[in-house]
Amino acid sequence: MVCTMSDDLSARIRAIIGGQSVRSFALGAGVAPSTLQSILSGNRPTLDTLIAIARAGRVSIDWLATGQDMPRSSSVSTMPVVLDEDLLGRVVEGIRRVYKEVGAAISDRDVGRLAARIYADLSDAYEDPDERAIGLKMALQHLRRDLQGVPLPAGMASGKRLA
């Protein structure tokens, strides 16, 4: 079997998708899942789509397109981190509010860990602050639903649940 350029591109895209579903990665990249599936099947992407995939995968466009250069974008590692303090504050407040509403306990350290994950997901998925606010609302709804599905430990009829 002869390996073509599109096979190599497909392999590189699959490598950056990792354990995520194609649909999840595509949506996070702002690409239609059917478009990403088409590229994985050997069709050539547009430049805009290739750029979106590279950004979502945090790889250089050169590496994604050619397989040359370092796989991880050097611009990502050398860029100063710009923290949206307001967004992070709203993430933390939202987590605490949800836990309080469902009567679940969470340590400060776990609030920090969860806030970091949600913040990173929002920052990766949305550039627009309004979209991030909507994304945060959705993330907190998912958190609430997940917490409400957690049963109380045996022997605890009431009181605070552990998450």
Image (tube, rainbow, N blue to C red):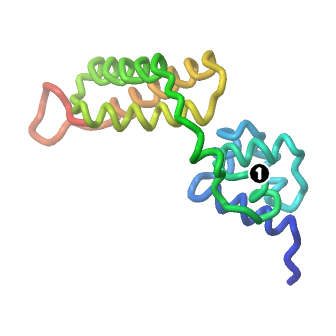
Please tell me whether residue 162 is drawn above or below residue 77 in the rendered image: above
Q: Residue, x 65% and y 62% (percent of image)?
A: 15
Q: Residue at x 37, y 35 (%)?
A: 114
Q: Is 128 situated left or right of 138 in this image?
A: right
Q: Nearer the viewer, residue 69 or 16?
A: 69
> What kind of residue is marked 1?
Ile
Residue for point 77% across, 51% down: 61
Residue indicated by mark 1: 61
Name the residue at 44% across, 23% down. 88
For this view, does 163 lie left or right of residue 14? left
Q: Is residue 96 left or right of residue 155?
A: right
- Above or below residue 140? Residue 31 is below
Residue occupying the far bottom of the picture:
1
**Which residue is the extreme one toward the left?**
155
- Left of 64 or right of it: where is 116? left
Labels in figure, total: 1
Classify mark 1: helix, strand or loop.
Answer: helix
Quadrant that contains the N terminus: bottom right
Q: Position of residue 162 (x, y in %)?
A: 21, 35
Is residue 110 positioned above or below 39 on the image? above
